Image (spheres, grey):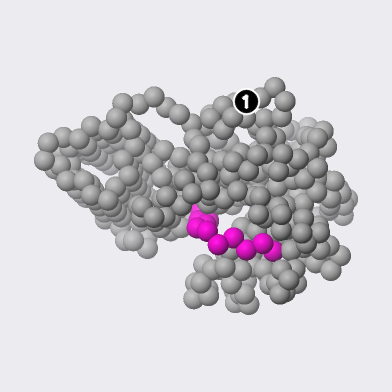
Amino acid sequence: MKNSMGIILTGENDVDLKELSQFRSVAAVPVAGRYRIIDFILSNMVNSGLRNIGLITQKNYHSLMDHLGSGKEWDLNRKKDGLFILPPYVSSQNTGWYKGDVDALHNVISYIRRSTQKYVILSSSHIICNLTFENAFQFHMDRNADITVLYTEEKEDRQQELSRYTMLETRADGRVQDIEVNPSMPKTNKASMEIYIMEKSLLEYLVEECIARGNYDFVRDILLKKLDLLKIFGYAYHGYVARIDSIWSYYRHNMDILDPVLRYELFFRSGLIYTKVKDEVPAKYGENVNISNCMVADGCIIDGDVKDSILFRGVRIGKGAQIKDCIIMQDSEVQDHAILEHVILDKGVMIHRGRRLTGQDTYPVVIGKGTVI
């Protein structure tokens, strides 16, 4: 694995995340009390032994750059290799807006070429999981594969959700024989994790070939068109995987983390998940408050009742306030006797005294950053 580099694409479609991605990229969306989505795939790569990781950004990346900094928390602030944040740039040949993920890779091709590693792990950034790549890499070597795609086996009754994914159909030996992109009637339950293992030289060739023909989509223009020419295999991952691609998926997977068994798997089983460290005081609880089944980050001051919720750093809950099934992000304040149920508050939101907000578990109320109600 030390002969492998990582490339993370952070230009995912953010339309369905609405207010949560209005001022930040999907990779920088806060999750689980004090983490960002990017922390998971970045920590997975570091825990697997990768020491050269490039992050290709597209838009709204200032929050992401502020969070990652020099990569110190991931032990990537190094003289040799380390963390490389690769924002778009404007030139006579480049408008700064990528036409697709292949176009994004082509714009950082000089970084890829000068990297000394032989293999590359290419990943999107909206996946939450805890894995190391040793087994998948060994599978790749044993099959003598050109490209290995990591996938999960989903429940077939979730057809509407599966229609948002790239679905793989594999043979008995694991070789991919068909790919469907966002199918309305998927023929298989094998959903791509959008994580790929291949040789760096092959990636360079495929990117250059696509650009020369005016093609820009990695799945449609590389994987689909070369199923018969390249040995593309699928590797099944059986652990917990969350794809954050909508408000509903964001809410559901955050609520899943309240399960202690799942929380252990996601944060400890295969390796630790690292994030930006902030020096905050411990959470403070008032007298006679009722707190049950919650994740409470440092710096919170709680004087109300909170149940089945996630509170980020610096959240304030007033006296007599009732919070249930909610996600409240950093520095938000809920004043006295306010009632919130199935609500997502972005950073710095103020809910005034006595206000009541109620959503549904399938359609939570989302309040944008800095809003006052």
Query: In the displayed structure, does residue 286 sit left or right of residue 209?
Result: left
Looking at this view, name the residue that lies furthest to the left: 288
Residue designated by label 1: 77
Quadrant where the N terminus lies? top right
Instruction: Tell me which residue sits at (72%, 74%) in the image.
Output: 171
Q: Is residue 164 above or below residue 373?
A: below
Quadrant where the C terminus lies? top left
Query: In the displayed structure, does residue 130 sit left or right of residue 248?
Result: right
Magenta stretch containing residue 20, yes or no? Answer: no
Instruction: Tell me which residue sits at (59%, 72%) in the image.
Output: 189
Q: Position of residue 369 (x, y in %)?
A: 40, 39
Looking at this view, name the residue that lies furthest to the top: 79
Image quarter for residue 319? Answer: top left
At mark 1, the secondary structure is loop
Which span is picked out in magenta?
A: 234-244
Q: Amino acid at mark 1?
A: Asn
Q: Position of residue 21 (x, y in %)?
A: 50, 45
| Residue 319 in view, yes or no | yes
Q: Is residue 245 above or below residue 48?
A: below
Q: Is residue 172 above or below residue 304?
A: below
Image quarter for residue 348? Answer: top left
Mark 1 residue crowding within 10 angstroms, few (<14) / some (14–19) / many (20+): some
Query: In the displayed structure, does residue 157 sit left or right of residue 353?
Result: right
| Residue 192 in view, yes or no | no
